Image (tube, grey):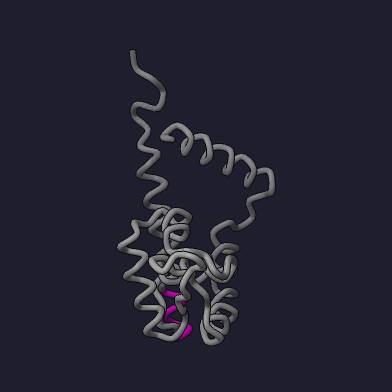
Amino acid sequence: MTHHSDHRAYFFKIDTTIKKIRNALQKQLNEAGFDLTVDQWVLIDHIFRQQGISQNELAELTFKDPPTVTRIIDLLEKKGLVERGLAAGDRRKFNLFLTKTGEEIYQKAYPIVVEIRRKGWGDLSEADYQHFVRIMDSIYQNFT
């Protein structure tokens, strides 16, 4: 017996929408002169909000594998935006912090991110947002 979702490639719709948003954000970051990729921004954003986060926690939060996070953190460290500090009691773990330069970049780039969020959301309402979150959470939970 067929189900109403059998012919609806909703995952394709989600994927293409995410790519469109990422491309728009990358274009704006580039035009504003930021030497940042969207993936670098995502990590900077999480580190800003949780100074001292571990690389493993960051990988879990961003749904990126640990080697990818390590590679991006290495790049951000070379750019002088992020620094690693040894975790208390475990010399194998690092906690991540934004440098002063990293915080300045965050403050300058954040308005661009907000602009993209506003553009994407357009004139959708708060009720639309609540429905959207409920639907996305439901799809997510179905795979958990």
Image position of 126 (left or right of 17) = right
Residue 125 in sight in this render: yes
- The single residue placed furthest to the front in the displayed view is 89
Query: How far across and how far down the image is residue 22, in percent?
Result: 42, 63
Query: How far across and how far down the image is residue 141, in percent?
Result: 48, 35
The range drawn in magenta is 27-33
- The single residue placed furthest to the top in the displayed view is 1
Q: Which residue does the image show at 58% across and 38% down from the upper left?
A: 134
Q: Which residue does the image show at 42% across and 47% down from the upper left?
A: 14
Image position of 91 (left or right of 118) = left
Residue 23 in sight in this render: no
Q: In the rendered view, would you say 131 is above or below 68? A: above
In magenta stretch: residue 115: no
Q: In the rendered view, would you say 133 is above or below 38? A: above
Q: Which residue does the image show at 40% across and 67% down from the upper left?
A: 39
Of the 4 image quadrants, the one containing the N terminus is top left
Query: How far across and how far down the image is residue 96, in percent?
Result: 49, 71
- Of helix, strand and loop, which mostly describes the magenta segment? helix
